[in-house]
Amino acid sequence: MHSETLRKIISNYLFKKFYFSIVTIKMMTQKKINDLSYKIVGCAIEVHKHLGPGLLESVYESCLLQELKETGLKVNSQVQVPILYKNKDLGGMLRIDLLVEDAVIVELKSVETLIPVYKAQLLSYLKLTSYPKGLLINFNCENIVQQLVPLVTEEFSKLPKE
């Protein structure tokens, strides 16, 4: 198969996957998303309690992925996001660390200090995907909650509260 044709097929598949995820989000409420975020943070705390700080981001990602699955949550890792600009597929792909229940993006870090570009990265992912909420979690710290940045979008504000 020609590589351009294959790229279009993959891009179309990913677009449909995100479209159906957006439809699922429309059935969500702010409370459900906040409750889901609370569960995600609880799982991150559990991972941090067992591993502590100082490991590679990929280690925390694998462990958090397992912890979320054991909690019964639907989670995908390294989710590819097509780069669409003015409804045109530019052929590139971004990768989201974790996508939980097709509703919350989780971006993981294991760094000395969270710098503004990490928040900007998560905001860009939220904008490109139209997901309502994202969590930026830094594992290289003593207290996960102090290194947690929750972000919501305009899509979140459009959801019913209950």
Image: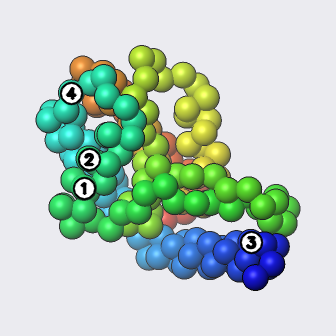
Depth check: 127 or 47 in front?
A: 47
Badges 1 and 2: C-beta atoms under 8 Å apart? yes
At a point 24% along the width and 55% down the height, the residue shown is 66
Q: Percent from the top left, x then y, of residue 39?
A: 24, 53
At a point 63% along the width and 78% down the height, the residue shown is 13
Disc 2 crowd, CA 10 A, few/some/many (<14, 14-19, 20+): some
Q: Quadrant of residue 44?
A: top left
Residue pointed to by mark 3? 7
At a point 80% along the width and 78% down the height, the residue shown is 2
Residue pointed to by mark 4? 52
Residue pointed to by mark 1? 66
Q: Where is 38 relative to 12, above or below? A: above
Q: Quadrant of residue 70?
A: bottom left
Nearer mark to the viewer, of 3 and 1: 3
Q: Is residue 33 left or right of residue 5?
A: left
Sequence-wise, the earlier of marks 4 and 1 is 4
Residue pointed to by mark 2? 63
Question: How far apart are labels 3 and 2 at the CA level?
Answer: 31 Å
